[in-house]
Image: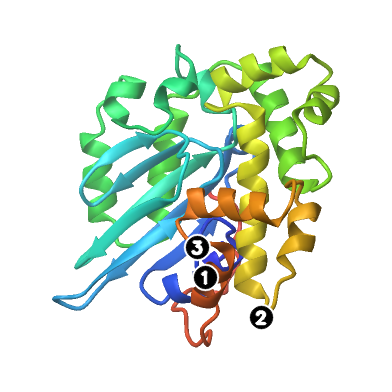
Amino acid sequence: MSDGLDEPGILQPAVSLRHFDYQRYAPAPMLGELVDNFWTTSWDLAEGTSYTAQVLPNPSVNLTVTNTEADVTGLVRRRYDRHLAGRGYAIGARFRPGCFRPFVDFSVSELTGRHRPIAEVLGRDTSALRRRIAAQPDTEARVGLLADFLRGSWPEPDPTALEVAAVVAQIADRRDLTRVTQVAALAGGTVRSLQRVFASYVGAGPKWVIQRFRLQDAAVRAAAAQRVDWAALAVELGFADQAHLTRAFTATIGLPPAAYASRAQPDLGSTGVSDAVRTPVR
């Protein structure tokens, strides 16, 4: 189990993690073929107060059970905001990019930008799952309940899903991959074939996926450094120039990079998250 300070998708983490707890669990080996991680959040805010958590998600599908709903959330193109008030929780499975596609008989692009009930997407009632999770106070046990539910819908092997996940992992890890032609060559196909398979399995094109990871890189750098050479960072991340980075960052995150950096670097203080690392979920 790990905390949210190393989670690139959480925006302004030093501020955000004062308002809610975040924990991430590695899946068991079999589940890990398709599931990137299980995650949990919980919050208990004083009466009359609230907080809007902001996330720049990975290009992934999430299956989530909260104290109010049980949904599948497709790829989110811009910043994702969740308003928190009172007491609540969320337990989720984040799938490896491309790896929710084997669970459904339609293109994952149909989920992009949408929330749909798990029961509608997977054809399975979630009433019992929600009751069991609500009645279970232990966070890791709640994650185990969600893992067991997923096992009941486990799909037949899909080699394409794993191939797509491997390509996306390289995009995430290699900052030198900044053009679709590079990724197509890495995948051993044409740009057009890559675009088709990404639309079906990821829910967005490879150009968008490249930019999403590079914007996450920029947000992490902004939150961690007192000063950032934005012009040099733009070139490093494959943007044409600083103005290009600024436009993309602002359109997606809602603030120019420098303004985001100034908000993301207060005194770290206490975050209220655990520093423990645990074994994979069963």
Task: For label 1, count other residues whose C-alpha is less than 10 Å away and answer few (under 14), some (14-19) or many (20+).
Answer: few
Say which residue appears at 59% left-offset and 36% top-offset.
Answer: 96
Residue 259 marker: 1
Tell me which label, 2 or 1, sits earlier in the chain. Answer: 2
Determine whether the residue tagged by mark 1 lies in a helix, strand or loop.
helix
Amino acid type, callout 1: Ala
The vertical placement of 280 against 22, above or below, is above
- Residue at mark 3: 11
**Image spot of residue 236 (x, y percent):** 80, 54
Tell me which label, 3 or 2, sits earlier in the chain. Answer: 3
Amino acid type, callout 2: Gln
In the picture provided, is 86 more to the left or to the right than 267? left
Say which residue appears at 73% left-offset and 32% top-offset.
Answer: 166
- Residue at mark 2: 226
Q: CA distance from mark 3 to mark 1?
A: 13 Å
| 2 or 1: mark nearer the eye | 1
| 3 or 2: mark nearer the eye | 2
In the picture provided, is 66 more to the left or to the right than 202? left
Amino acid type, callout 3: Leu
Determine whether the residue tagged by mark 2 lies in a helix, strand or loop.
loop
Q: CA distance from mark 2 to mark 1?
A: 12 Å
**Image spot of residue 197 (x, y percent):** 63, 17
Q: Quadrant of the N terminus?
A: bottom right
| 3 or 1: mark nearer the eye | 1
